[in-house]
Amino acid sequence: MAKDELVLLWTSADREVAVQMAFMYAGNSMRLGWWREVTLLIWGPSARLAAQDPEIRQHLPGLAEAGVRLLACRKCADNYGASAALEAAGVTVVYTGELLTRWIKEGKAVLSV
């Protein structure tokens, strides 16, 4: 059911937003069962932050272990030269514009940070 699926659209290049909001909420959502499915979609400047900041990358395996699906926009990541680093960190890097549009039309909850 789409109403129990969250897409956390992470666009901010701010480290504090990443750690104190995006990562905390995504991880807790899965660990505590607030949502059946959580996708963290790395879009725009967050791709550069995730690729270049070792502390930020350290959080990604824990999110994946909690069950958070980690995706990044291929176009965004390529624009920032971040695709290889994101893939090495366990993030699936694909084109996401059409995918995000479909999720919105299907009624998935989308939270932008």
Image: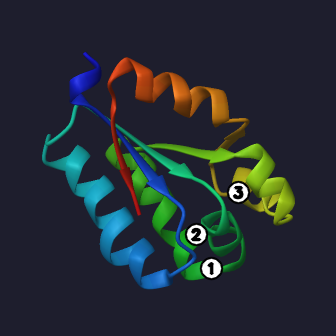
Which residue is label 1 attached to?
54
Which residue is label 2 attached to?
57
Which residue is label 3 attached to?
86
Horizontal and vertical percent position of residue 36: 23, 30
Which mark identifies residue 96? none
Q: Earlier in the sequence, mark 1 or mark 3?
A: 1
Q: Disc 1 residue type?
A: Pro
Horizontal and vertical percent position of residue 41: 52, 48
Residue located 42% across and 29% down the image: 104
Query: Rounded to the nearest whole Å, what is the CA distance between mark 1 and mark 3?
Result: 11 Å
Horizontal and vertical percent position of residue 27: 30, 55
Q: Disc 3 residue type?
A: Leu
Say if residue 100 shows up in the picture.
yes
Horizontal and vertical percent position of residue 94: 72, 36
Residue located 65% across and 69% down the image: 45
Q: Disc 2 residue type?
A: Arg
Query: Rounded to the nearest whole Å, what is the CA distance between mark 3 and mark 2?
Result: 8 Å
Q: Earlier in the sequence, mark 3 or mark 2?
A: 2
Instruction: Residue 50: name its quadrant.
Output: bottom right
Contact flag, marks 3 and 2 (Cβ < 8 Å): no
Determine the secondary structure under disc 2. helix
Contact flag, marks 2 and 1 (Cβ < 8 Å): yes
